[in-house]
Structure formats: C-alpha cells, structure tokens
Image (tube, grey):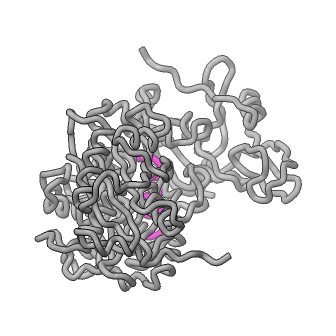
Amino acid sequence: MTETLPSPVVNADSAPYWQGAREGRLLIRRCDACGQTHFMPRHLCPACWSADLRWVEATGRGTVHSFTIIRRAPLAAFAPRVPYVVALIDLEEGPRMMANILGDDALDTAIGDAVAVCFEDRGEGAAVPQFRRAGGRG
Amino acid sequence: MSETSLRNRVAIVGVGESDIGKVPGMTGLGLNAQAAKRALDDAGLKPSDIDGLLTAYSFTEPYFMLGSVLCEYLGLQPRFNASLVVGGATPAVMLKHAAEAIVAGQAEVVLVTAGENRATGQSRDQAVAALTAVGHPYFEQPYGSSIPGFYAMIARRHMLEYGTTREQMAEVAATTRRHALLHPNAHMKAPLTREQVLAAKPIADPLGMLDCCLISDAGGAFIVTSAERAADLRAKPAYLLGIGEFHTHEHIMCAPSLTEFGATRSGAAAYRMAGLGPADIDVAELYDCFSIVPIIEAEELGLCPRGEGGRYWLDGRAAIGGGAVPVNTHGGMLSHAHAGAAGGLFGIVEAVRQLRGGLGARQVEGAEIALVHNEGGILSSHCTMLLGKDKA
C-alpha cells in the first residue's frame, strides 16, 4: 500500500495560511508596527513583538537559497518520489521558507534559480505551497 | 549584573563509556547505568557521594521525566536533578548547569549521563523516521525533508561560498576513522578511505551515507565536582577553564545564515572566560553529526580562517600528529559512536582522557588544554568548553 503524502496540520497560528493555500494564494504575515514580514506565521512579530499583524499575499516569486536532492526518503510516504528536491526559498518579500521544487527539470535546480509558487494537492481540497523553476537566476 | 566566572571552579573527575556498537543485551537506561558506574569507579567515588544528576532525552524509550527516571533506576535521591533537551548541545550545556549548581552550593558531586540503544532498540527505518521530528512539524516535514537534507543544504552553501569540496568532506570521515582505529571501544573497527566515502550510497546530495554519523547503542557519563574536592580524588582532574553557549534558531528555515552560526559566539564566551584563545588549544573534540559540521566549527572556533575548514582536514592538519590542533581523536560520531546526546558527550570524555595522558598512539603529545564543542538541532544551539590539565 502506498502511503499518502502528509496533509497540512492546521492550528490557530496557521489557519489562514492553509486556507490561502486551498485557494491558491501564498499568505505571509506582515507587522503593522515595524513593517517586517516573517515566515512561519506566529502570534506576534519576531522582530518587535507587536501582535499588530496582517496577512498579505506574497507574489510567489523567489530564489533558491540552497537545496538538496533527497535520495533516501525519511518516511515511507515520500519513497516513491525519490529523488526529489528540498529547497530553501527566499521570497521576494524577504522571508525564507522550505518547499520542494517540482517539475520535469527539478533535478537541474541550482542555487540562485528564480522560482515561482505553485500548489500541490494533498487531499480533500488541502494543498501545500510548492515551487517550480521559473527560468533565470535571481 | 556581572557574570560569575566558572573558571577554575569545578573539574571533571571521572569519565565512563558503556559498551558501544550493537549491544542487544542492554536497554538505554542500562547503557546509562553502565557508563555511570564506570565514571564513578574512575573517580573513586560511591553512589552515596552523588547529590546531583543531569541527563538528556531518549528517542527509543518512552520515559517522560528522564532525569527522575534515571535517578529512580540508579537508586539515587539527589537534591539537584533535571533532564535537559538542547539536542546535541545537551552534554556541554549539562556541564555548564552542573558547574553553576556546584558554584552556587546547590550540589557537590553531579553525575552527567546520556545514552540510548539506538542501534538495536529500533529498526533503521524507525531511527530515520524518528529523527524527522527534528524538522518543523508543519512547515518542513510536509516536504519530505530529513536531517541529512538540512545539513546537505548547509554543505552546498559552504561549497558555493568557499569552494569547499566533496573530497574535503570525505577526508573528515577518513581522518576520524583512522583515529577511531586507535580507540579500543570505538563502534567502527575497519579502515575507511576517502574514496570509499565518495563512493558510498547517496543520501541527500552532496552527502552520502558515510558523511553521516553512526547509529549506535551507547551511553556516556562524567562526574563533576568542585576544584577543591577534585584535588583529593584519585583521578587527575580536568578543570573547567571556560564555557559559553549561544542559540540562534531551531529549524533551518529560520536560521539567520547557512554559513555563519552560533559557535563563534559560544566559542568567544568560552575563550573570554578562560582568558585563552585558539592558539592555546592543544586538542579539539568537535561535533560531527555530518562531515560538513567540523569543517564549519573549525572555522567558527578559530582553528583556521573562515572558508579554510575543508583544507584544514584535507591537508591533514586535523589528524593526530598533523602539526596543528588534532580534531576528534576518539573518532567522533562518524566513527566512535552516536546515540542521541551521548554522541557529543564522548567528545568530553575524550578531552578529559587526552588531558590525563597515556593514550599511546592516540595521545596528543603534551595536551594541556582541550576544546570541546557540542551543537544541537541544525547548527542551532551551541556550547563550547575549554578544559585544562591545570587551572588557567
């Protein structure tokens, strides 16, 4: 039996983020007090501790800060996907997040690659943000 | 408020290792107990002398309050006890907490122990799956990330920025294997070449199987007491000269940098407390969960300039008798043992033994000052200590 890829776990800090993903939107937190954006979503701003935060939609454009090609899956659910790319993406807005690079040319990924967000179905309408190579170097 | 210096105030007076490797006849608690008994015997102390116990955590056994659990198992009723979880940094942090408790009069003889039956207490698949819990449960684990993958991303960044090579990383594993072959209790007993490391099964590019630390059954322990009491005991004391910690993140997605970490700050604090610098170090035991890590730590702790860590290993300077500061003289976690927090604890055990002397071919000639660095998470939490054969 093939195990299914994990579905997002929604909690009070992240509910709008995962709702956004269902709608094909990448949402990040911006602080109205100091203007910093951050990832992952929190109850308060890690830069200034203001709780005066808003959700903003990211452009979904970013660059690859670093990446690896996983050849040995840590969990059985990911074994059929091997080899696959795990990357740290620097979003245009500043924050850094983790995702896979998807697509036929994913294994050609290099540091500095421009990438664009896409959304991967994880069952029952849930989705996780992912990225594809967008051509060019950031 | 000024910092209370821990310099010259306490010493490690006993060290012990359990049986190491695949030890199917023992539980994790049993491995801790065996190491503790050996450390106590080494110090020439009795169980009733122990009035403090610190231990870490276990992935293989289901205990909640592990410090209390271990006291119960060992028949101890101490006045100072806790289990600490700072990942691989835990052993060094435990020494710091033990020293602070002793200096504050809250304990006199503290047993510090860690260990797990990771090799036989679970399957390899279970071990790998359990360790995925180190990734962020909501924002990293959904992407099939792994601990080798996190360190691989750090390695790749180091390769890009400083020209570090796969060959240099492979030499870390090869050099430390040569050291392990000089250690009677090391998990690995067969020689290992750089070529074998490069040809090993790929795990997470650019890291292969032999760039990754072992999965062992192992327990380690040491005994800490005041410098005054240490002078009356049977073993040669290893004095704590300086110690410092620094913490920057837990998950790699939140790391401030993939090339600059908290070891620089923890090391600076340790050097400052001791009144010493990198030029004073005779031997270094660095955390080596993956081959890239002691390369970065050698740079951050000043054994070589930034960006030259790879060459430090490839040129043979990290080897015993290599003309510089030898690193991981027991074989490290890549070749001596890795079982949870015990991995870094064995670096402390080895540093004490090097300062006592008499290790034969493994001995670093004239070792008087040792540096030990432990890190936890994904180069997230750092603790550096300096130990001396004499007070500073």
The correct choice, above or below, for A89 with respect to B105 in the image is above
Residue B164 shows up from this direction? no
The residue at 60%/25% (across/down) is A7
Within the magenta stretch, is there residue A17?
Answer: no
* Number of disc labels: 0
The residue at 68%/51% (across/down) is A91
Q: Position of residue B114 (x, y in %)?
A: 37, 49
- Most foreground residue, B332 or B57: B57
Q: Position of residue B282 (x, y in %)?
A: 30, 79
Q: Position of residue B227 (x, y in %)?
A: 38, 74
Q: Quadrant of residue B324?
A: bottom left
Q: Quadrant of residue B41?
A: bottom left
Q: Quadrant of residue B323?
A: bottom left
The correct choice, above or below, for B224 with respect to A57 in the image is below
Which residue range is magenta in the image?
Answer: B148-163
- Most foreground residue, A38 or B275: B275
Residue B288 shows up from this direction? yes
Within the magenta stretch, is there residue B159?
Answer: yes
Q: Position of residue B296 (x, y in %)?
A: 42, 66
Q: Is residue B23 left or right of residue A73?
A: left
The correct choice, above or below, for B149 with respect to A127 in the image is below
> Residue placed farthest to the top in the image?
A1
The residue at 49%/35% (across/down) is B64
Q: Quadrant of the N terminus of chain B?
A: bottom right
